Image: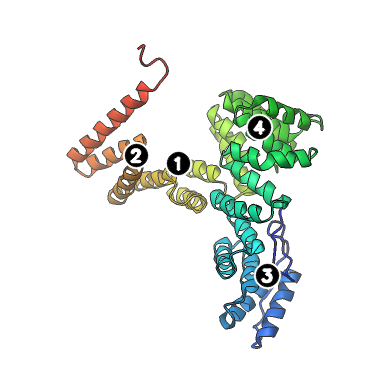
Amino acid sequence: MYKATLLPFVLFSLWNHTGLGQGQTQPALDPQTLVQDAIQKQRSGDLAGAIPEYQEFLKLHPEATAIHSNLGAALAGLGRYEEAIAEYKVALKQSPRLPSARLNLALAYYKMGRIPEAAAQLEKVHAQDPSNRQVVIVLGDCYLRMNKNPDVIRVLAPEAKKYPDDLAIAYMLGTAYIRNKQVEPGQVLVDRILRNGDSAEAHLMLGTAKMNIQDFAGARDEFGKAVALDSTLPEAHVLYAQALHLTGDSEQSSKEYKAGLAQDPYNFEANLQLGANAREEHDYERAEQYFKRALETRPGDPGVTYQLALIDADQAKLDPARQKLEALVKEYPEFTEAHVSLSLVYYRLKRPEDGKREREIVQKLTAQAQAKQPGAKQQ
């Protein structure tokens, strides 16, 4: 759907690249020949051949901003996003207002599932070029994934007026309205989608509305219809998996999470849940693989760090577990489950006083949570 914006003479699809070169040739010594050959290879789809030639050229001319950006695009095309990001950052350091390199950086973050970083870069591109529709749509999707519904509305509401027949915009904007409890404008967009026939987007929006009111069975049915109508719709498999999990169908939920990962390997929720499932099955190696990918998407996420600490504890690696849990409760002092697990680890380490202290913290946090429940004062 989205194309990477490249600097002059190099055209490359970040999302829809097909066909890689079968080999790499030794780069020529002449810099001009090197870069021309690299550009030609990138044009023809031989990214594996273009990359070493770009790198060789940049050893001679590290100031060549355009080539850093082109190398980033080639690396991204092979899924080497971290390396691509490094090249785009070099290009931007040399030319801070270069919109094409910044857009490519944002798209690399987006493809990796590092959505907040993608949104931050896209806002800068949007400020420079507010008419770029690609930027508006991807930015709106970023905010939708981050559950920042007022920002989705801010970005997409003007676009929806310009393009009233664009169902992708209608879906994202309508979902944001529904999540934001703005039912009336959300319903208008649902109706607009429904007028175009029974659609996956409409069922996804309706499922989201039912999740908001905790009608998990209704949400499950709507998400199931969405997947049946369009199994490629972003987030559909993962939302369906969440609803299945909440209604007790763990086996089918795992299948849907895996389908979501096949579509988007960096989906955070799918990696986190499948990692947790693998840990419960004592398949620690597979669990760590899922959690590692989740951390690539959200570095330092407390939920993932907690799961990794549990893996250590499960395998009697008590000191590494203690270190992770101590760091967690220091940064997130109200993380009750982490305090519980830390208490157990202390007892296993023969540190009863520390364990007792953590138990007391758990009791205090539990009492505070109960006091906030509806009807607590009357009781």
Residue 80 appears in the picture as rendered: yes
Relative horizontal placement of residue 343, taking residue 170 as reference (left or right): left
Q: CA distance from mark 1 to mark 3?
A: 40 Å
The three-letter amino acid code for the residue at tag 1 is Glu
Q: Which residue position is annotated with label 2?
A: 338
Residue 228 appears in the picture as rendered: no
Across and down, in percent, residue 143 comes to 60, 43
Relative horizontal placement of residue 254, taking residue 186 as reference (left or right): left
Whichever of callouts 1 and 3 sits on the residue coming sooner in the sequence is: 3
Are the residues tagged 3 and 4 within 8 Å (C-beta)? Answer: no
The three-letter amino acid code for the residue at tag 4 is Phe
Whichever of callouts 4 and 1 sits on the residue coming sooner in the sequence is: 4
Across and down, in percent, residue 51 comes to 63, 73
Q: Residue at x 74, y 39 (%)?
A: 160
User: In this orientation, which residue lies closer to the viewer: 120 or 238?
Assistant: 120
- Does residue 67 sit above or below 182 in this rendering? below
Q: Which residue position is annotated with label 4?
A: 223
Q: Which mark is residue 213?
A: none
Whichever of callouts 3 and 4 sits on the residue coming sooner in the sequence is: 3
Q: Which image quadrant is residue 161 in?
A: top right
Q: CA distance from mark 4 to mark 1?
A: 27 Å
Question: Which residue lies most toward the bottom here?
Answer: 29
Judged from the image, the secondary structure of the residue bearing numbered disc 2 is helix
Q: Which residue position is annotated with label 1?
A: 281
Are the residues tagged 2 and 1 within 8 Å (C-beta)? Answer: no
Q: Residue at x 38, y 46 (%)?
A: 311
Q: Residue at x 68, y 51 (%)?
A: 135
Whichever of callouts 2 and 4 sits on the residue coming sooner in the sequence is: 4
Across and down, in percent, residue 274 comes to 51, 43
Whichever of callouts 2 and 3 sits on the residue coming sooner in the sequence is: 3
Judged from the image, the secondary structure of the residue bearing numbered disc 3 is helix
Q: Which mark is residue 47?
A: 3
